Image: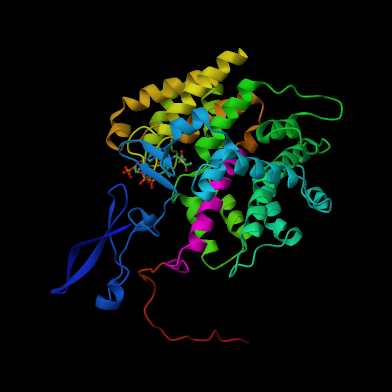
Amino acid sequence: MDQMSQTAKVILDGNTYELPIVIGTEGEKGIDISTLRSISNYVTFDHGFGNTSNCESAITYLDGEAGILRYRGYPIEQLGESSSFVETSYLLIHGELPTPAQLGDFSDLLGEHSMLHEDMKNLFNGFPSSAHPMAILASMVCSLSAYYPGIDMLNPVKEDFDRIVAMLISKVRTISAFAYKKSIGEPFVYPRQDLEYIPNFLNMMFSSPTRSYKIYDEVVQALKVLLILHADHEQNCSTSSVRLVGSSWANLYASITAGICALWGPLHGGANEAVIEMLEMIHKDGGDVDKHISLAKDKSNRVRLMGFGHRVYKSYDPRAKIIKASAHDLLNKLGINDPLLEIAVKMEEKVLNDPYFIERNLYPNVDFYSGIIYKAIGIPMRMFTVMFAIGRLPGWIAHWKEMMESPSARIGRPRQIYTGSRKRDYVPIIRR
Ligand code: ACO
């Protein structure tokens, strides 16, 4: 971050205040208002932090107008095409691509830490089979802090941090697959040291003591692209939650759990599940896309077109572009003809030509086509947001680490504009 000599002038009650301007490496400019209250008694007001930067970050660059997304400077298109999920995770967390030796060490750590403490299986048994896998994931990740105690927050040792990062990335995959097995009443399939990250997950999900699962390269490739595209997205709702919880020096597991919970909502990561629900509903209703679009435009209800719109993208989400192509490609390769994909394509076409959506810059987002790929792979709908969480985990960890290492990080504590009652005196209820 550069400090420009130029300042912003704010005139309040006839007084002029000069505030510094900060500028990022891609030219993004911000007014530093951190002293505003102490010099003027004013705070700033911004619903949903729509125009507020809470930190400086060197992890992900996003230009919502131009549709650009880069991790540590590398375009996501290049990473999706040529990197692996494990390598991209390393890049996000450590800031640079690993050397072959570093990648080997990281992969070894992931293999070493893939098992869950046997006692944790009892926790799975405590959940009803109807439990949503996101509820299980959040509870289990928080429980990891009890089974695998964390880092000394004030004095983290690099080896401890590397071990805990590997533990989280590896065990979250195992927990997710176990949560699925629990939901269908099948025995858990343990992780295997001989399989790479994604095949290992697919094997834990879909093989059983009586059934072996054939791992297709096309499926691994499609899943890899999805995980990489979900791996980080700067200060979104879940990542901001991780930062906010972590800012109190809560441990990494607790902070990540907050991210999982925030991701669950249908306005955020839960949208991938909601998109398929919406497309299925339209399909059952005879495929009338116009009817649903009209409902979403009608302000007298809370219906929204799930998978459309984004706080920062005011053009086509670059991730959605890649995922749409990948969905077509995978379905072709697997010989699947999914009517939901047809409905989705039809809906997109109509939306992109509809003045309501054009005026508001609403385009398909990352969640619009991802569910079609998960569905083709055989991943059930209730696991979609869990898949998102597996993908987003390295980003959450990278942000937690960046915040903990930043000398300027402070506990997250927004201000408010109070609009409640003014002072009034308490009158006790007369008791008989
Ligand atoms: N369908 C219909 N109208 C929409 C949609 C939508 N999907 N999204 C936004 N709008 C409308 C709003 O009603 C509002 O209209 P108005 O100006 O007439 O009041 C206008 O567009 C601006 O919308 P906001 O709510 O201000 O946008 P915001 O940035 O707060 O919300 C969000 C972004 C939550 C993603 C929103 O677009 C949405 O709800 N989309 C559907 C859910 C979804 O797909 N979420 C996943 C996002 S990607 C991710 O988190 C991984």
Eyeballing the image, is 215 above or below 50? above
| In the image: residue 277, left or right of residue 304 | right
Rendered location of residue 240, percent (x, y): 48, 55
Queried whether the magenta region covers residue 409, the answer comes back as: yes
Ligand 1 location (quadrant): top left
The quarter of the picture where the N terminus appears is bottom left
Report which quarter residue 298 is drawn in.
top left
Task: Measuring from the top left, give residue 215's x and y in whole percent.
Answer: 70, 23
What residue span does the magenta drawing correspond to? 386-413
Extreme residue in the right direction: 210
Front residue of 2/418: it is 2
On the question of residue 196 being in view, the answer is yes
Pick the front one: 145 or 102: 102
The residue positioned 66% from the left and 30% from the top of the image is 379
* Residue closer to the observer: 230 or 272: 230
- What is the quadrant of residue 181 in the picture? top right
- Establish if 210 lies above or below 61: above
Residue extending furthest toward the left: 14
User: What x and y, as percent, mark residue 141?
Assistant: 68, 53
**Measuring 29% from the left and 66% from the top, which residue is drawn there?**
33
- Residue at 16 percent across and 74 percent down: it is 13
Chief secondary structure of the magenta portion: helix
Q: How are the residues colored?
A: rainbow
Residue 125 is a magenta residue: no
The relative height of residue 18 versus residue 87 in the rendered view (above or below) is: below
- Rendered-image quadrant of the C terminus: bottom right
- Nearer the observer, 204 or 6: 6
